[in-house]
Every structure is written in C-alpha cells, then in structure tokens.
C-alpha cells in the first residue's frame, strides 16, 4: 500500500500554481486545459496587482476547487489558511514571510503542508515544524514572482539531497520543458510552474511537454 509520502511525491510531479493575475486567458479555461495536459497538483495563489479579495476570492477559489475535485487533482491554497479551512482544501503552502509552519500545522491538522525554503537551515526548521514537502528555489530566473530572493541554480537541490533532507522536494522558478529534466536529475521529486503553463499560447500542449520532460515514461 502506497504511503502518504510516496503519494505526495506522485502529486508533486507537475505542480501548477496560478491566480487570476497570472493568466492571459480565462483562468477557468486555463486550469481545465492544464488538467487536460497532465498537471498532477494545483495551487491557488491569488496575489499581485488586481488580485481578488474577500467574497470574490472565495467564489473564484470554489470554482477552481470544483474543477480540481472533478479531475481528482489535489487543491492547495497559498498562504490563506482561513480560506483553506473554509473550503476544506487539500492543503496549504506558505513562504518564509508567512505565518510560522508549526502554527499553520496546528491549524490545518492532517492537510498537506508545503513550505518554501531557500537554505538548508530553513528546510530543517520546516521539517521540524511539520512540513510535508518543500518548495525550493528560485532555481532559474523568473518573472512570475516579485521576490528578490537570489537565484540558486541546481546546486541547492543537490545540497539538500546530500544533506539527507527526507521529505519530497519540488523545484520552482523559471522552469520550462527545456530545463525540467535537469531539475529532476538534480534530485527534485517534481517541478512547480506558473507562467510556463498559464502564459502559454497552447496550454494543454505546454503541460504535456512539461510532463514528458519530467517523467518521459508516462
């Protein structure tokens, strides 16, 4: 029987992150096409200029969650623990600037908890606080986030594996079909993308290309 950690590794294979500000087309259509293309997990990240708030944000999240549920794709919410609890989302993803992981873990119980990390010390603390997986990056330069965190390259993934980080790792930041395999070969369990799918002209094809790059046997 597959255990929780192994199940999560499979979900992390092609991890799509999106909010309304990331889409050139209708976000509902974008998510539907991304699922058709083979994404394995979805994170609702409603941030940036013009981001929805309050009831509008909740209604939008509900629509996206239903699409994921119908397709049996886990639905993760970025940062907003209260929204995740209200919608009974599958999990929450937080960054270093958000509420401490140990507090979030207490609030969400058994739901998945992902934590963005940039150093080995942050990773070790996240694991101690109850993280189920780590988001690691940015691996390459990216325009999808307005963070000022330095670019880490593949070495940080290799470093985490050398130091026996035991939980699943997903690489994020500037990942495309051209470099996705490098991220997996360095030791990541999956890739996380925003614009490589949300900004693509042919969304389904873009997701399929990423899926093949990450897992050519599927």
Image (cartoon, rainbow, N blue to C red):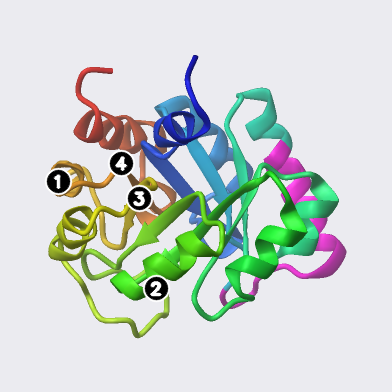
Question: What type of secondary structure mainly makes up the magenta span?
Answer: helix
At label 4, counting other C-alpha atoms closer than 10 Å, the crowd grade (few under 14, some 14-19, many 20 or more) is: many
**Mark 3–mark 2 distance (CA, rounded to whole Å):** 15 Å
Q: Which residue is mark 3?
A: 170
Which label's residue is closer to the chain start, 1 or 2? Answer: 2
Q: Secondary structure at mark 1?
A: loop
Compute the Cα span from label 1 to label 4: 17 Å
Which residue is tagged 2?
122
- Comparing 73 with 93, the one in front is 93
Q: Residues within 10 Å of mark 1 (few under 14, many from 20)?
A: few
Does residue 48 appear to the left or right of 121 in the view shown? right
Q: Nearer the viewer, mark 1 or mark 4?
A: 4
Residue 162, picture quadrant:
bottom left
| Dots 1, 4 in contact, CB < 8 A | no
Q: Nearer the viewer, mark 1 or mark 2?
A: 2
**Residue 178: mark:** 1
- Asked if residue 57 shows in the view, the reply is no
10 Å crowding of disc 2: few (<14), some (14-19), many (20+): some
**Which region of the structure is painted magenta?**
48-65
């Amino acid at each position: 029987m597959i255990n929780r950690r192994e199940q999560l590794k499979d979900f992390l294979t092609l991890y799509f992150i999106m909010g309304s500000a990331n889409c050139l087309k209708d976000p509902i259509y974008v998510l539907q096409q991304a699922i058709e293309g083979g994404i394995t997990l979805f994170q609702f990240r409603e941030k940036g200029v013009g981001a929805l708030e309050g009831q509008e944000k909740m209604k939008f999240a509900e629509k996206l969650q239903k699409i994921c549920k119908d397709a049996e794709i886990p639905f993760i919410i970025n940062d907003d623990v209260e929204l995740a609890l209200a919608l009974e989302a599958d999990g929450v993803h937080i960054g270093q600037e958000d509420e401490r992981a140990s507090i979030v873990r207490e609030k969400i119980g058994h739901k998945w908890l992902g934590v963005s990390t940039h150093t080995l010390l942050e990773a070790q603390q996240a694991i101690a606080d109850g993280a189920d997986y780590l988001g690691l990056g940015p691996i390459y330069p990216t325009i999808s986030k307005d963070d000022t965190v330095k670019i880490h390259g593949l070495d940080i993934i290799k470093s985490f594996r050398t130091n026996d980080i035991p939980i699943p790792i997903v690489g994020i930041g500037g990942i495309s079909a051209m470099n996705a395999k490098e991220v997996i070969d360095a030791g990541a369990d999956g890739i996380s993308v925003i614009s490589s799918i949300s900004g693509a002209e042919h969304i389904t094809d873009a997701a399929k290309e990423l899926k093949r790059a990450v897992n050519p046997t599927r």
